[in-house]
Amino acid sequence: MDKYLQSCSTEFWKKVFKAELEYTLQELKGTKDVLSVGCGPAIIESGLAEHGFNVTGLDISKEALNQAPDSIRTVDGSAENMDFADSSFDAVIYIASLQFIENYKEAIKQTARVIRADGKLLAMLLNPQSQFFKEKVSDSNSYVNKIKHTDLREIERTIAEYFSVQTEFFLGIKGQQIFESRNPDLAALYVIKGKKNAKTGNGFSTVGVL
């Protein structure tokens, strides 16, 4: 964890987190109570709290949660078995965490349960097609090698069972450079934005690439 936190403090990762935070702030407009699943030390979540959101961070790692700021509520637990009441949050976010969850389909089902009517889901997924991903995978020490799910379309289809969905590629990364890009070869992230269906689980969805 110390090594991870040290890497997070580099200028490169500070720029990445800043871009992700700005994107998330735009997408969460109109919401207040936010659950971040797989929040880790809650770097993005801290920024959300500073902007007035009520943030709950969920993670299976107590060590990571111990690094989270006091400005957010932290809960030690799994995404597949969320210990929250139905309709507890206006929005649920996964910042590059969903693909690392063993049973992500159950996590999405739980997500739909705890989100209020017309609530939002924001899932930032690592894009396996990107140059950034391919470089990370080639490094045996990279956290990316712990990824469990790389089929973005399958993840999207699962989310679309419960949410009306829009998608886009985001965050161009080349070496140490960070820039705006929707090019699948350069964009490090594939973002799935969902709005909870009126009748969750009825199979109705709208799927479209922005």
Image (cartoon, grey):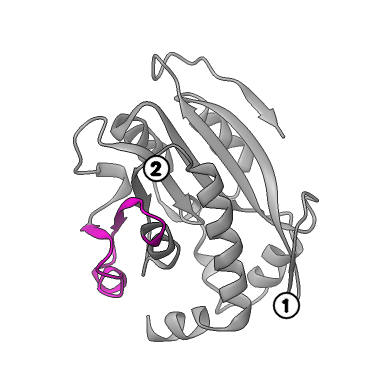
Task: Tell me the quarter of the picture where residue 2 sits.
Answer: bottom left
Checking the image for residue 92, the label placed there is: 2
Instruction: Return the x and y of residue 54 as percentages of the image width and height.
Output: 30, 50
**Which sits earlier in the primary sequence, circle 2 or circle 1?**
2
Q: For this view, does 64 lie left or right of residue 194?
A: left
Q: Residue at x 40, y 39 (%)?
A: 31
Residues in magenta, as a range = 50-75
Q: For this view, does 4 lie left or right of residue 37?
A: right
Q: Residue at x 45, y 35 (%)?
A: 120
Instruction: Return the x and y of residue 186 as percentages of the image width and height.
Output: 78, 59
**Quadrant of the image for the N terminus?**
bottom left
Query: Which residue occupies the foreground of this view, 159 or 25?
Result: 25
Q: Residue at x 25, y 36 (%)?
A: 88
Amino acid on which the number 1 mark rests in the picture = Gln
Residue highlighted by disc 1: 176
Residue 17 seen in this snapshot: yes
